[in-house]
Image: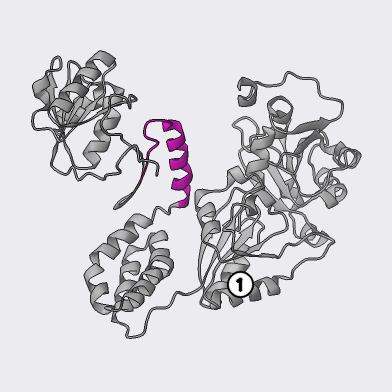
Amino acid sequence: MLSMPLYPLFADLRDRHVLVVGGGDVAVRKTAMLLKAGARVTVGAQVLAPELREWLQLERIAWRAGTYQSEWLDGAWLVIAATRSRPLNARIAADGQARQRLVNVVDDPALSSFQIPAVIDRSPLLVAISSGGAAPMLARRLRERIESLLDPALGSLLQIAQRYRARIRARYDDLAARRRFYDWLHDGPVHASLRAAQPVQAEQQLVNALANRKEAQIPGSVALVGAGPGDPGLLTLRALRALNEADVILHDALISEPILDLARRDAKRIAVGKRGGAMHTPQATIHALLLEHARAGKRVVRLKGGDPFVFGRGGEELEFLREHGVAYEVVPGITAALACAAYSGVPLTHRDHAQSVRLVTAHCQQSFNTLDWSDLARERQTLAIYMGVSQLDELTLQLIAHGRAADTQFALIENGSLPQQRTLTGTLRALPTLAARHAISAPALLILGEVAEQADASHWYGELLGEPPRRFAVPRTLADAA
C-alpha cells in the first residue's frame, strides 16, 4: 500500500493564536485567510504592507515589529513563514520543530511540516485539494474545475440543514427515511429557493415538510438553459452545473457535441431542434415533453443555443410551465449577437458611431412584414440580425429603399465562436452577391452599421472574407504571444 504524504486535517483556529512571519504581499494573502477562519493573527516583520497596516489600525491583527526572534513562536498554534529569505525560513521551521509547532513555509514543502491546500469555500462546506507540494498548479486547476460544479447555494443549504438537524432526526428516526428526506432537501424545492435567493421561502418549505405526516417527495423541475453560441468555453458556471444535475436534456439542433459531452453521462438526451426548411419538432410537442418528464419527478434541462429569452421561445415555454405548476429556473446564456461581435472584433456600440443596438429576427417572410423598416434604416445604430441568411436579398432591398446608405458596412459571421467561423465583410449593396459567392449558410448573424467597419482591422478569430481581398496587418493576439 502506498503511504499518504500528508494527513488531511481541518483545523479549528477560532480565537487561537497564529503567527505569520513576513510583512509583504504573501503575508497579506495568508493573513486574510486566517482572519476569515477566526484566528488571532500576529504578524512579525520590520515593515508591514498597506493592507496589514490597515488591519493593525482596525485591531484585527497584532504586530511584532523588528527582526525575527524564536520567542515569537511561544503560544502559537500554527506558524507561517512568508519571508523572502530561505535561510530565515529554514530557521523558523527548525525553531517550530524544536517547539513542536506546525510550520508552513510558503512555496517550500521541504521545510514545511504542514501544507495549505487549494480551498473551495462554500462555508460551512470546505473542499481542500493538495498535491503535497509536488504540483501546486495542478491543485489550483483542479480547484477551478471542482469550483465550477459546486453551487454557491450549497453553503446556505448546509446552514439551514444544520439548524434543523435535531428536528429532522426527531421527525425521521428511521435511517432510510431520514436519508430520503435529505435527498429531498438537497434536490428539491428548498435548494431551488436558496438558488433563487429566497431564503425565507426555503426555510418555510422545510418547516412545512417536517410538519407534514407524509414523506416529502422530490418534485420535477425544468431549467431553461442558454448554451451560448457554440464554444463550450462560453458556458456559464450555472449552465454547467445544470447539465451535470440533469436527468433529461431537451436540446436544440445547434447545440454542439462538445457542449453535450459536458452533461451528466446518464442523462437522457432528446433532440427537439428546429431547422428552416427541414424536419423540426413542433413547439406543442416540446411543451408536452417538458411536462411529461417534470411530472415524472425528473430534473429537466431545456438546452437552447444562445440565450433562452433572445429569439429562443423561452418566454413561451416559461408561460407554459407556470400555467401547469412546474417549478422552473432560467439560466441565461451568451446570445449570438454578443458572441459573434466579440469573435469578429466588432463592437456593437461605439461612442462615435453607434449609440444603440437593435436585435432583429428575419427567419421568414412573415417576420419581415412586421418590421418597421424606416426605423431600422436609421444611421448611427447597429443592427444585429438573426436567422436572416435566406432573406438577404429582401433585407438589402428594404433597408436601401427606406434610406439606409448602400455603402453601409456589414459583417456576416457564420458559425460564430466555432473553429469553422468565417466572417464576411463588405458594403450593404454587395451583401447578397458576396454571401452567395462565398456560400455563407446558417447559422450566421448579420451585423450592419458603421461599427462593422472595425472587422477588417480588429478581426482575430477564424477566416476573414470579403471583396476585394483583404490586405492588412494581422493584430497581435494572445495566440501570437504563446
Instruction: Quarter of the image for the N terminus: give it.
Output: top left
Element marked by disc 1: helix
x, y percentage for residue 414?
Answer: 77, 43
Q: Which one is nearer the viewer's eye here, 356 or 229?
A: 229
Q: Which residue corresponds to mark 1?
A: 290
Residue 42 as seen in the image, left or right of residue 405 = left
Magenta-highlighted residues: 128-149
Residue 254 as seen in the image, left or right of residue 217 = right
Is residue 204 shown above or below 474? Answer: below
Residue 449 as seen in the image, left or right of residue 262 = right
x, y percentage for residue 477?
Answer: 63, 24
Q: Which one is nearer the viewer's eye here, 26 or 354?
A: 26
Give yes or no for residue 94 being in the magenta stretch: no
**Residue 381 makes an appearance in the image:** no
Q: Which one is nearer the viewer's eye here, 323 or 241?
A: 241
Is residue 343 shown above or below 251? Answer: above
Instruction: In the displayed orientation, state which residue is furthest to the bottom.
Output: 213
* Quarter occupied by residue 108: top left
x, y percentage for residue 46?
Answer: 17, 15
User: What's under tag 1, amino acid-wise?
Assistant: Leu
Kindly identify the residue that appears in the image at 77 percent across and 32 percent down: 463
Give yes or no for residue 144 being in the magenta stretch: yes
**Residue 197 makes an appearance in the image:** yes
Kindly identify the residue that appears in the image at 27 percent across and 28 percent down: 112
The secondary structure that most of the magenta stretch takes on is helix
Is residue 432 shown above or below 272? Answer: above
